[in-house]
Amino acid sequence: MDVLQQIQWENLFNPQLAWESFPFIIQGSVYTLSLSLVTMAIGLILGLFTAVARMSGNLVFRWPARAYISVIRGTPLLVQLFILYFGLTVTGITLTPVTAALIGLSLNVGGYTAETIRGSILSIPKGQWEAAKSLNMTYWQSLRRIIIPQSVRVALPPLANTFLSLVKDTALLSVITVPEMLYQAKIVAGRTYDYMTVYILVAAIYWVICTILNIFHERLEKRYGRYTV
């Protein structure tokens, strides 16, 4: 029975292959982390302007913002990436894998963070708006000096969760040949035919990265959280 269990375990995970494949697979983490950071930054800026447009009383700004958020939140990220990378070629526009990834992830993050930011802004008491108005501040001055600094604390936890999800979603970029970690793992698995070992290794790397990011998130939330005393 012990021999059978040992054979089954060896078929499930090969430590030697994992050790030899690790340097090659971890190279993809450069794309995983850099794309996550860049697209999160772009998405936050896009989300902020979209959220403000979504709350605008002007239909010219509000309806396009609502349509953008609806499309992004109502369609899978994988489909959005396919449209950018494969679909646009019909129109004569050809994007590189990294460019398509940057645009697709940024637009996706922008759509989700827009609703997060909008909700955090709406959570600020109306008295804050009235106080800013009593100081003769304009709408934009009120947002920049009074409302947004307070709403950041409210938005911090969901935005951190969005970033964690974004890091994991970069695995979808392997389907458009971005050489991130899962794509590198597919190359190793295709050569060795040991898919279980390679994919367990990738899962472990993602888990370590997300665990480290979650530790930073918890410290950041304790320092700047809304209910910090």
Image (cartoon, grey):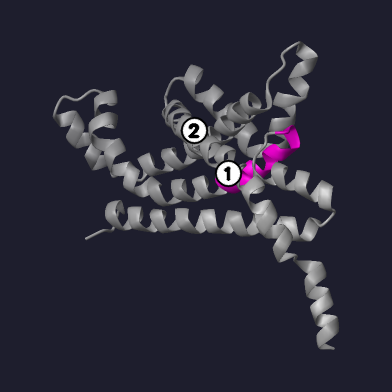
Name which quarter of the figure residue 1 lies in: bottom right
Q: Please report the residue visible at 71 percent of the width from the left and 62 percent of the height from the top.
A: 16
Q: Residues within 10 Å of mark 2 (few under 14, many from 20)?
A: few
Single out the mark in the foreground, 1 or 2: 1
For the question of whether residue 207 can be seen, the reply is yes
Say which amino acid is labelled 2. Answer: Val
> Which residue is pictured at 53% across the width and 41% down the height?
33
Name the side, left or right, on which 223 lies relative to 64.
Answer: left
State the image coordinates of residue 73 (x, y, percent, origin top left): 62, 38
Q: Calculate the distance from the C-alpha at mark 1 to the C-alpha at mark 2.
A: 14 Å
Q: Which residue is mark 1?
A: 29
Locate the C terminus and report the quarter of the image it occupies. bottom left
Nearer to us in this view, 75 or 27: 27
Q: Nearer the viewer, residue 211 or 229?
A: 211
Q: Quadrant of residue 81?
A: top right
Q: Where does label 2 land, which residue? A: 38
Mark 1: which amino acid? Ser
Q: Which residues are magenta?
A: 167-177
Could you tell me if the residues under marks 1 and 2 are in contact, i.e. CB atoms within 8 Å? no
Measured from the top left, where is residue 56 in percent x and y? 42, 25
| Residue 228 part of the magenta segment | no
| Residue ID at (49%, 51%) | 161
Left or right: where does residue 128 sit relative to residue 160? left
Measured from the top left, where is residue 207 in percent x and y? 57, 58
Q: Is residue 148 above or below residue 26?
A: above
When the figure is inspected, residue 61 is found, relative to residue 208, above or below; the finding is above
